[in-house]
């Protein structure tokens, strides 16, 4: 008997709007200063939603979105804002205690 394994893909588990928002929040909590990590998390959400639809909603090219949200791209803040808005998410500001 052999066991077949496959790579775990978060995209398969982002099924609802709440799943997506909680995932992004968890990523922001885990690494709030890691721009590439946060961009990649947005890329995961975009893939779960459908990159082609996101491209239409943002007016940006599908391939450029894949690159920008890969974690290796360097998207502009304007691109990030367009993506967040098109995904139905919202940025919020909160104060944090500094040690």
Image (cartoon, rainbow, N blue to C red):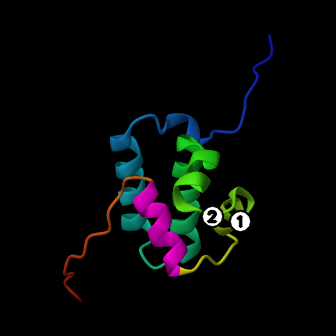
Is residue 69 something that shows in the picture?
A: yes
Which dot marks residue 60?
Answer: 2
| Residue 52 vertical placement versus 59 (above, below) | above
Residue at the image position 19 percent from the left and 84 percent from the top: 97
Is residue 99 something that shows in the picture?
A: no
Which dot marks residue 64?
Answer: 1
- Percent position (x, y) of residue 52? 64, 47
Is residue 66 left or right of 47 when viewed as pictured? right
- Secondary structure of the residue carrying tag 2 is loop
Q: Magenta: predominant secondary structure element?
A: helix
- Percent position (x, y) of residue 4? 76, 23
Q: Nearer the viewer, residue 99 or 22?
A: 22
Is residue 74 left or right of 84 when viewed as pictured? right
Magenta span: 77-86
Q: Nearer the viewer, residue 66 or 23?
A: 66
Q: Which numbered disc, 1 or 2, marks the residue closer to the eye?
A: 2
- Secondary structure of the residue carrying tag 1 is helix
Q: Is there CB contact under 8 Å for labels 1 and 2?
A: yes
| Residue 1 vertical placement versus 35 (above, below) | above
Residue at the image position 45 percent from the left and 71 percent from the top: 81
* Mark 1, other Cα within 10 Å: few <14 / some 14–19 / many ≥20: few
Spatial CA span between label 1 and label 2: 7 Å
Residue 20 on the magenta span: no
Residue at the image position 44 percent from the left and 53 percent from the top: 87
Quadrant of residue 27 within the rendered picture: bottom left
Considering the image in quadrants, where does the N terminus appear? top right
- Percent position (x, y) of residue 57? 52, 54
């Amino acid at each position: 008997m052999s066991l077949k394994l496959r790579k775990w893909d978060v995209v398969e588990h982002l099924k609802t709007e709440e799943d997506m928002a909680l995932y992004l929040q968890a990523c922001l909590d885990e690494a709030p200063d890691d721009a590439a990590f946060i961009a990649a998390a947005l890329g995961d959400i975009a893939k779960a939603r459908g990159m082609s639809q996101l491209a239409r909603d943002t007016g940006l090219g599908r391939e450029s979105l894949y690159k920008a949200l890969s974690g290796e791209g360097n998207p502009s803040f304007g691109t990030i804002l367009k993506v967040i808005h098109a995904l139905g998410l919202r940025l919020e500001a909160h104060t944090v205690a500094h040690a």
